[in-house]
Every structure is written in C-alpha cells, then in structure tokens.
Amino acid sequence: MRLLLVRHAIAESLTDAASDPDRALTRVGRVRFQRDSLPWLERQGMCDRLLYSPWRRARQTAALLRALLVPSAAMEPCEALAAPPDERTLGLLAAERVVAVGHQPWLAQLAVIACFGKGAEDFSERIALRKGGALLLEGEFKPGAMRLMALFSPAQG
C-alpha cells in the first residue's frame, strides 16, 4: 500500500487572513506548485483516495492535485489531517493508494509514526518538508510498518 503525504502549497500569511484555517494559497504558491510539484506527484501514479485537511490552503492544494491523481474520485475532507497525529490516524487514511494533503509539522510526525511507531515523533523535526513537498511511504497502514520511499522537496525561490 502507498501513502503520499503532501504539504500544502505556499499560502498567504496569517496577518492577511482572518484565521489560520482560512489562509488561502497565493498566486505564487499555485504557480510554483503546478510548475515544480505536480510533475513529480504525477509520476507517482494514480490513487484511490484523495484526503485533505479541511483548512482552506490544503483543500485548494488537493483541488490542484485531483485532476492528475484521482479524476474519478471525490476529494474527502479529513479532520485528522488538521491536528497532531496519533496511531489511529493511519487507520483513517487506509486504502491501496492514498494521497493526503496537510500541514507541517503534523505530516512529518505522521510519517515518523508510520515508519517507526509511537514514541518516535521527536524525530519528525529532522524531516524538512517544504511547502509543496511530499513524502512517499509504502507498507501496511499501521504504526512502524511503513517505509519511507521518497522525499520530494521543491526548489526554494
């Protein structure tokens, strides 16, 4: 089974939005995501489910991904992607091929739980997941049973 964790694209600053969940993607964020991230994400193949944090910038990033990866599937909001993960989070995402769009540091924490199990979350600080970046994991959707297969980091600037 495959899990592709995608950090949302560049969004407006908190001072430009009513609240953190309301922050929208910027024009630059959309352009860079389409130019830099989408080609790599497309090479990872189609998926069965596209889940996203209900926060605006994650929902907008998922919409950019949908046509490439899940043209026949609905996008699914997932509240668990807008909060610190725990062992149960993996079970909520489970399917054969999943894309989950969310936020840092929670995506890195989820990857560490998936690969190393509960209690290893502190290692997530060592994963530099830039905006528009992605982590590809494979294995069973249970703590400690997945393997990190790839890290995509878009260029800065």
Image (cartoon, rainbow, N blue to C red):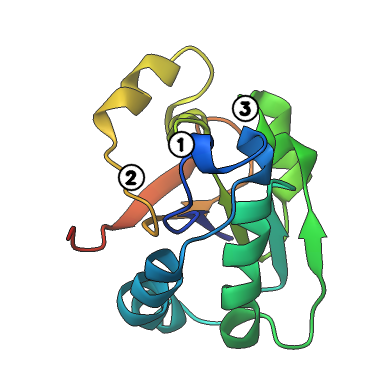
The residue under the point 19% across, 63% down is: 155
Which callout, 3 or 2, points to the residue nearer the camera?
2
User: As shown in the figure, which amino acid type bears the numbered disc 1?
Assistant: Gln
Give the numbered dot on residue 104: 1
Q: Mark 2 sits on what residue?
A: 129
Query: Which picture quadrant has residue 80?
Result: top right
Residue 38 in picture, x, y percent from top left: 42, 78
Give the numbered dot on residue 85: 3
What separation in Å lies between label 3 and label 2 (alpha carbons)?
A: 16 Å
What separation in Å lies between label 3 and label 1 (alpha carbons)?
A: 11 Å
Residue 23 in picture, x, y percent from top left: 60, 46
Query: Which picture quadrant has residue 136?
Result: bottom left
The tag earlier along the polypeptide, 1 or 2, is 1
The residue under the point 59% across, 60% down is: 1
Q: Quadrant of the C terminus?
A: bottom left
Kindly indicate whether the residue at mark 2 contacts the one at mark 1 (C-beta within 8 angstroms): yes
The tag earlier along the polypeptide, 3 or 2, is 3
User: As shown in the figure, which amino acid type bears the numbered disc 2?
Assistant: Leu
